[in-house]
Amino acid sequence: MTPTPHPHRTLGTTGPQVSALGLGCMGMSALYGAADRAESVATIHAALEAGITLLDTGDFYGMGHNELLINEALRTAPPALRERALTSVKFGALRTVEGGFTGYDGRPAAVKNFAAYSLQRLGRDHIDIYRIARVDPDVPIEETVGAIAELVEAGHVRHIGLSEAGAETIRRAAAVAPIADLQIEYSLISRGIEREILPTVRELGIGVTAYGVLSRGLISGHFARDRELAPSDFRGMSPRFQGDNLHHNLDLVDRLRKVAEQQGVSVAQAAIAWVMSRGEDIVPLIGARSRTRLTEALGALDVTLSADGLAAIEQAVPADAAAGERYPAAQMAHLDSEH
């Protein structure tokens, strides 16, 4: 099977060429409530057929479930699609049996241990981009990145990434080894990286893989005000999805909807296209869990936003207009990018 032509972007000056949109696979295994395994595999297949090459996961998504799911999807995909797939893996999160998070481990021995397990679950001989999910405050970033660099030298990893790192940490990491990309939240309602982090990565020639481009569905145009979230859906604890914050943020979505309708696109397509317009060095990750949502997201590739269109979107949803932090306080404390 020949993949559909899909625009590409390069992750930084040292990273790989990837599809202009990547597929974030987390929601297929964890944190958004129950998922349909067969539909998840079918969605990964559809993404590959549409020309998406970048599959993003974490070894702690469903305690390894997500990596095994990607393994299944790639094993059952036509060879031409399977061979083009690139895996971006986050590691380091420490979990409890009950599913809680207890911190992050960036020690060199732990880095190599996490990688060994990921390679086994993925069924691959290398990981294309490897990154610690959150900076371990007890381990110098130089040691963590140095351990990944040794995995690169051994052929187990192709490129080094960072996740939710602040400008100073990014500079320290880049002094140790080439960094392909920074994975960080970036959307119409999460624009904090524009102040210091984005200029820093651009100065250093580091790309950005942007997650949360639809703010976990909040600005997708599909989130209802009266929606009841499953107990296993972490959005129930997210400040932006609670009480008056939720109503305020959905008012912003209503404003965005009017602009999107004027341009003949969906809310989600407008939000994704806006992130894509921020620069050729930014690759949005779309968290579609079904083929229907994937098809809608792919439609953003056909959206060309004029200067007036961009201005209208930013007038509807100004920077810093969202109510509530993007994570609960305990998780915000783990974000080096917010310090």
Image (tube, rainbow, N blue to C red):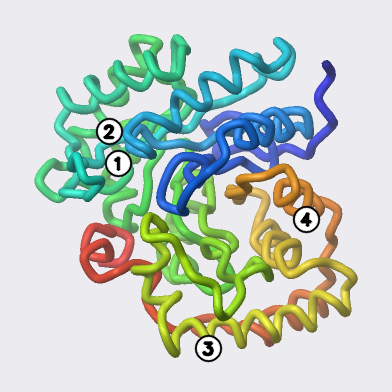
Res. 17 in view: no
Please tell me whether mark 2 sits on a helix, a strand or a loop. helix
Name the spot of residue 273 as percent of width and height, x first.
Answer: 73, 61
Which residue is the site of mark 4?
A: 300
- Closer to viewer: mark 2 or mark 4: 4
Which residue is the site of mark 3?
A: 248
| Amino acid found under the numbered disc labelled 2 | Val
Q: Residue 173 carries which label?
A: 1
Which residue is the site of mark 2?
A: 145
Contact between labelled residues 2 and 1, with CB atoms less than 8 Å apart: yes
Please tell me whether mark 3 sits on a helix, a strand or a loop. helix
* Image point (70%, 86%), residue name: 255
Res. 208 in view: yes
Q: Say which label, 2 or 4, has the lower sequence index.
A: 2
On the picture, is 200 further left or further right than 275? left
Mark 1: few/some/many CA within 10 Å (<14, 14-19, 20+) = many
Mark-to-mark CA distance, 3 and 2: 40 Å
Please tell me whether mark 1 sits on a helix, a strand or a loop. helix
